[in-house]
Image (cartoon, grey):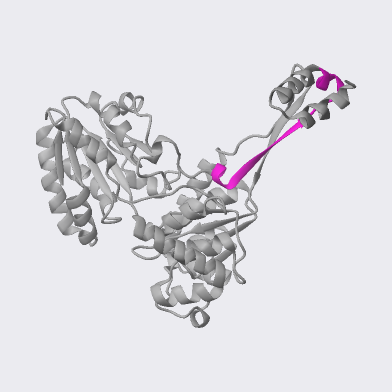
Amino acid sequence: MLRLSTRDPNFAQAFERLVRDRRESGDDIARDVALILADVRNRGDEALADYTRRFDGHDLDQTGWRIDAAECREAFDALKPDLRAALELAAQRIRAYHEAQLPENRDYVDETGVRLGAIWRGVDAAGLYVPGGRAAYPSSLLMNAIPAKVAGVERLVVVTPTPKGQVNPLVLAAAHLAGVDELWRVGGAHAVGALAYGTKKIAPVDVVTGPGNAWVAEAKRQLYGVVGIDMVAGPSEILVIADGKNDPEWTAVDLLSQAEHDPAAQSILITDDALFADTVADRVGVEIAMLPTARTAKASWDTHGVIIEVESLDEAPALANRLAAEHVEIATDNPEALMRGIRHAGSVFLGRMTPEAVGDYVAGPNHVLPTGRRARFSSGLSVLDFMKRTSFIQLDEAALQAVGPAAIALADAEGLPAHARSIELRLGL
């Protein structure tokens, strides 16, 4: 774990190294993924079967390529009542939040008489990647599938890795609740390739979303343009901004809530209280020892954990903007004051009673968020990731006379005479 202080004369250089640190895939993964995608494009289902035998340890022809809707319904019906209620609450809150994101169509006539507007429509088909290796995440299925349904996507396809052919019943239950149309027992970069290129069994989609490991993220990056993607996501990260009034145990566990995801995940604490920093550091060690996910959390904290001491928390927004973290918790008496200075963050959690974990499940906003400083230029998953906008224009003769001469002048200046003539003819010039 790294300790930094803004009082240190070398802080600027050390912080710059932290900002520039990349915890994501290297050239070797990019090469491997390129070969996998080319293989899927050339051999289709045969390649999917081979990679599934190799990575997931089962034969798709024996275990079944596709999980049918009845099996998903059975998994949902078999849930314990409290777990079913929790899943339904999460789905209801996610749906309500994303319904409020739906954009409005526009149709108006401007002062020159030109009719202008735009129509928003959902894509025809979306592919959702749901992790199933290190852990299975029914919450991720809901976070991806529900915005797609709200957007009006007609065909919703889920791919998920199934080690030894097994799939988490909660994932099946979430697929039923979200109204997934197809659920395929394939995962990894090859599954992303199948969604993009299509195979005899799996028809191609228009957009691929959802979190995954480094190979999945790299596959999405390489396939952007063949399909749309939500983002290229790296390992999870959390930045906690906290004063000394917080409970060190709470803060330690909040830091570990991301560390337990992946050895490459990163947890950072910014505080103006040195004693609090020391206590949190000690408490992290205690909490790790009690976690079933201790091995992963310890690897993450030991390698990528950071505590930054500042003279005043007024320094925190500037540091947070440089880090542009996926999750930012502000645990202070007046979190709004600090949030106003934070321009770059995937999602912000305000106050001492708002742990990041509530956002992963039941708050409503999407938990698929930009990582690796991408919050500088991108946002969390939304209904807009599953929609596209088509603009329209309509002119009558008077409107064309009002704006046409300017278009002719610009076309002539750009050396495009056919452009100019198409307008001139209509104006009788």
Is 393 magenta? The answer is yes
Position in image of residue 155 (x %, y %): 63, 58
Q: Is residue 355 left or right of residue 194?
A: left
Query: In terms of depth relative to the viewer, which is nearer, 96 or 4?
Result: 4
The residue under the point 61% across, 61% down is: 204
Residue 274 falls left or right of residue 72: left
Residue 410's quadrant in the figure?
A: top right
In the rendered view, does 334 fall on the left or right side of 289? right
User: How far across and down, in percent of the image, does residue 355 sit?
Assistant: 31, 42
Magenta region: 383-401
Q: Residue at x 55, y 73 (%)?
A: 45
Residue at horizontal 40 percent and vertical 38 percent from the top: 375
Q: Position of residue 360 (x, y in %)?
A: 38, 48
Outermost right residue = 428
Q: In the rendered view, would you say 232 is above or below 8?
A: below
Q: Is 273 located above or below residue 208 in the figure?
A: above
